[in-house]
Image (spheres, rainbow, N blue to C red):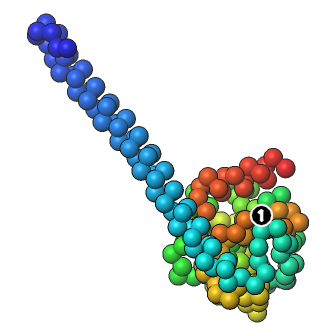
Amino acid sequence: MVRALRIGGLVVVTVTVTVALAYFLGSKVGGYIGKQRAESQYLEKRAAQTEAVLALARGLEIGTVIPNHMFVNLDGDSISLHSLLSEKTVLSIVASGCAGCDHLLKTIAGAAPDSTEHGCFVFISETGYQDMVEIPETYGLYSPVVYDEESEYVLQFFETLVYPTVIIVDRTGRIENLLIGSLTEGEIKEVIAANKGA
């Protein structure tokens, strides 16, 4: 309630601040709810995409152990997949010019600004050496980045390949989760926490 003019301009200031604060809080809450709704819709869409693609999979399913395939790293050295695994590892199969891959890489970079946390994310390129080089240069991600010279690794599992394909495995290479699309910031932080707690 505003009382006479005894408090002068202070009333106006108080009302203005109250309205501004209410607007600020309302926009923050509304923004949070909107973000949660958008993420929920994205997760539903991702689940449907994953189900459709995995229906074509030859032998890739949760609980199976991924083969210890040999890849080539940025230095041109051969390296086995299993040697790159940590307590929980995200294997991301990416390609140049893929909007979903770009979103995934940016999300990981944002959720894991500390380069010491990058080791549990392994990026697999099916399309060429140039894609590998772009990951540390463009996104600042100093994770293991490897190239499948013969493009055999994923094709032995899938009739159709969709980018990005994300495979989450434990230290033994056992598949814990399979996703077609990007990870959320929360999912990325869960992987980081699992490795810190190991």
Q: Quadrant of residue 165?
A: bottom right
Which residue type does callout 1 highlight? Answer: Glu
Residue 155 is situated, as x and y percent measured from the top left of the image, at: 72, 88
Residue 184 is situated, as x and y percent measured from the top left of the image, at: 58, 58
Q: Where 3 falls versus 115 (above or below)? A: above
Is residue 119 at all visible to an observer of this figure?
no
Residue 37 is situated, as x and y percent measured from the top left of the image, at: 46, 53
Instruction: Look at 37% across and 35% down and name the residue there.
Output: 25
Q: Quadrant of residue 191?
A: bottom right
Q: In the displayed structure, does residue 34 sit left or right of residue 184? A: left
Q: Where 33 falls versus 117 (above or below)? A: above
Local SS, label 1: strand
Q: In the displayed structure, does residue 131 sit left or right of residue 150? A: left
What residue would you read off at disc 1?
A: 176
Instruction: Look at 57% across and 70% down and name the residue there.
Output: 48
Question: In which quadrant of the rendered image does the N terminus lie?
Answer: top left
* Mark count: 1
Q: Where 51 falls versus 108 (above or below)? A: below
Residue 166 is situated, as x and y percent measured from the top left of the image, at: 67, 70
Q: Residue furthest left?
A: 5
